[in-house]
Image (cartoon, rainbow, N blue to C red):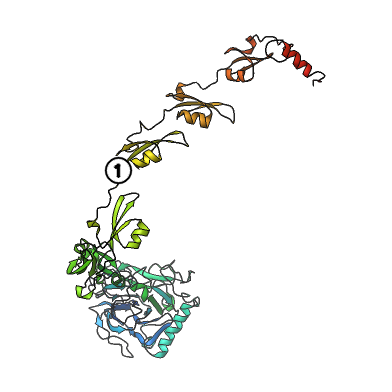
Amino acid sequence: MFPSSNIVSSSSSVTVTGQNSDPMVHPRFSVGICTAMAASLLVSSVHAVDVDGVITVDNAYGFAFGDVYGITTTSYYGGLRNTSAGEIANGAPVLFSGPTGPGFTNPGVGPELYDLPSLAPPDYMYLIAWSDDNHYQGAIGSFTIGSTSVGTLPNTGWEVFATGIDLDSTVASDTLTTDPADVQLINDQIAIANANAGNGGTSIGWVDENGMLPNGSLGLGELAFSTDDNTGGSGGQLPFDAIQGIPSNARWMWYNEDPVNISNPFGASSGGGSDGHKEFLIFRIQVEDVLQQITGCCCWVDDAGNQVQSQMSEADCHSLSGVYAGDGVNCEDFNCQQITGACCFLKDFGVMWCHNNYNASDCASLPLSTFYPGQSCSDISCDMEPTLGACCYEDPDMGWTCVETDEIKCLESFGGTWYVGQPCSWIDCPPAPPTGACCYEDPQLGTLTCSDNVEEFKCLQVFGGTWYPGLTCVDIADECMDPRGACCFQDPNDGSYDCIDNITDFECNEFYNGVWTGGATCAEVDCCPKLGACCVKDVCVQTTTDSCEAAGGTWMGMGLPCDQADCPEPCVFDVTGDGVVNFSDLIAIINNWGLVCP
């Protein structure tokens, strides 16, 4: 709108955060818009809300609350046009009292302050803005829900629809007022945006900072936020100093119809043509998105009776019977006061008692106790017949253990012994038996094996092993190990000979059918077979002693080659092959008389 050389103002020290939500809060709305923002009031869907807001816009705007389909004449505030730079940015916020026609300007200068108590909870907040198509344009503002401030910031849910309808702030009759015809025009454009039905002269539908429509497709142009925040100074995309009443980290926002070619959409001379960046513009933000993120510090007591403080919503805090410190209160900056209440406990066998003003930890130290934060003994009825008691059971990992529980859980879940109405402090559960390392022979592996944390009875009677009380398998590694050595074996696939180290005799014979050398390594043994000459009848073969004997041959000597072996001529008359010609040879011939040999 206006070039400003002497616009001076200071910003609030409040910091705008992202969206927040909690259905139990009362929003306060602060909006400032140089086409200052369509600050979106996100409010509870259950309770009426109070809104304080500061807005300023360069140049004209109105804002409203409504649903996804539009607004009404009673939920629309505006329109208002700033006709000078001072009306946009100079001075403290001026309470909005409603513009009067045909000038449609707010009394005083500076951003507008809105005080809107007990609004019906809306779904959306809308900001409708347009400029004078001259110098600069933009909208900035903030609003507060409970103690959480939300403003014009990137990545907080804002969207914009560029209608392509050219309104000028310099023309009073262009002002969109609460007149039903003006409200209907706004709602018609909201319907077009919802349907992504805009033409090439619009943004097609609601677009975000990336130019994306809600259905995930690409619109035309994109929502733009200024690179400079609300601290003012030279060198930014807009010439204004800090806007009073608006947090310093808030950003100006507008629409960029051509992000590729327009680097500063806040400058009217940077493109835009006669329609001033396809104005008028409708910004929106969904109220519930903000409320869902409102949290505060909650002081509560956990199941173990410990008082803790955690960041959560007010509703979640109440569900834990906690004390809620307030919206936006950070647990890092808040110390919960000690919570006291009634403590119901076992005073004597079968007798329950109640004490007031106990804290959680003191109550938890009493037998069979139940803590009721924030309550007095007159509010509760301690059971005179206790349903809890000590349960002694043997835990497989921890040994004998005691818990305080009911009888059914003790017997069915823990398999323990239940002591009605008595705390664990009164009961001496059997101590856990001592454990140690157990060294025994594994029947499947045939080797010594060790197991840790084994009781003596189990080691001796079940495993048949040797028990080492208080020791681990690492401690007895030398004692609990079969002798190891090298194993020479023949590979059944290719007939080659190989060797494996650190193996027991049992494993060598059982799994490799090999030859075991105890205490040796493969580097110390020769696994190659010892061959020699073997005469089988009148044939000589090179083989081992065992193989020669198995073939019924005559071993001629280790390392002797067959060409040096003097195999004896076979005796053809020794039919039975027993080395002697006698009656048995004759019987063999008679028994085979007439047989034709092949």
* Image position, residue 206 (x, y; %): 44, 74
Q: Which residue is mark 1?
A: 434
> Could you say which quadrant of the image residue 390 lies in?
bottom left
| Res 277 visible | no
Establish if 351 lies above or below 105: above
| Left or right of residue 501, residue 137 in this image | left
Establish if 144 lies above or below 464: below
Mark 1 Cα shell of 10 Å, populated few (<14), some (14-19), many (≥20): few
| Res 50 visible | yes
| Left or right of residue 331, residue 594 in this image | right
> Could you say which quadrant of the image residue 163 lies in?
bottom left
* Image position, residue 181 (x, y; %): 42, 90
Establish if 54 lies above or below 73: above
Q: Nearer the viewer, residue 282 or 575?
A: 575
> Could you say which quadrant of the image residue 272 lies in?
bottom left
- Quarter of the image that includes the C terminus: top right
- Quarter of the image that includes the N terminus: bottom left
Establish if 31 lies above or below 180: above
| Type of the residue with mark 1 | Pro
Q: Nearer the viewer, residue 294 or 105?
A: 294
* Image position, residue 520 (x, y; %): 43, 23
Residue at position x 37%, y 42% from top?
458
Q: Nearer the viewer, residue 530 or 173?
A: 530
Q: Nearer the viewer, residue 501 or 295?
A: 501
| Left or right of residue 257, residue 151 in this image | left
* Image position, residue 157 (x, y; %): 38, 71
All told, the count of numbered labels is 1
Look at the numbered disc 1 and give the secondary structure of its residue.
loop
